[in-house]
Image: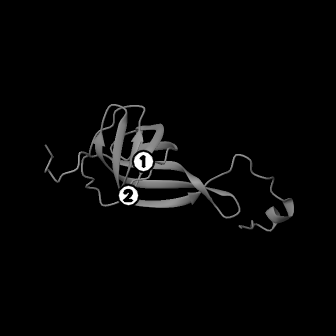
Amino acid sequence: MTDKDPRPNRPVERRASKRFPIEQEALYKILDHRAAAPESGSGMTLDISSGGVLFETTQQLQTGKRVELSVNWPAELEGGCPLKFVAVGRLVRAEETRAAMHIEQYEFRTRRNKELLPIDPEMATRGRLSYY
């Protein structure tokens, strides 16, 4: 007996953008102008796409809230300058220790390297540092 059902056994991927399994430390902050102190926490990204991020949380978050997520990016600029990925968007799914956000805007920022070389005093007096 053969199965004539053309559907595959696995669920169909309906997302328009490919997800990448990037697991990096992350910090998140709920953007709520009414809160006296913004709710924040740390976690780990599980996967990232051009449309969103799935990440672990330290507490359950509320769907629909705006969130800012900062991630230590695994790649560096030429010359070894570390990067940070910062995204702002809405939480579209929230479970006990996981949340998914839709990215509304993002940017890459340079971040401090823990092992920065000392600044050349002559360069500091000129008020300018050279970038690679």
* Closer to the camera in the image, 63 or 93: 93
Identity of the residue drawn at 14% across and 50% down: 5
Q: Are marks 1 and 2 in contact (CB under 8 Å)?
A: no
Q: Note whether residue 8 is visible.
A: yes
Residue 86 placement, left or right of 115? left
* Quarter of the image where the N terminus is located: top left
| Residue 119, position as x, y percentages in the image | 80, 56
| Residue 3, position as x, y percentages in the image | 15, 46
Is residue 30 shown above or below 48?
above
Q: Secondary structure at mark 1?
A: strand
Specify which label sits upstream in the sequence, 1 or 2. 2
Dividing the picture into quadrants, the one containing residue 78 is bottom right
* Quarter of the image where the C terminus is located: bottom right
Give the residue at mark 2: 18
Is residue 16 shown above or below 43?
below
- Between tags 1 and 2, which lies in front? 2
Q: Secondary structure at mark 2?
A: loop
Residue 106 — which label? none
Q: Amino acid at mark 2?
A: Lys
Q: Amino acid at mark 1?
A: Asp
Is residue 113 shown above or below 79?
above
Give the residue at mark 1: 47
| Residue 81, position as x, y percentages in the image | 67, 58
| Residue 84, position as x, y percentages in the image | 55, 54
3D distance between C-alphas at marks 1 and 2 = 10 Å
* Closer to the camera in the image, 2 or 28: 2
Dividing the picture into quadrants, the one containing residue 29 is top left
Identity of the residue drawn at 70% across and 46% down: 114
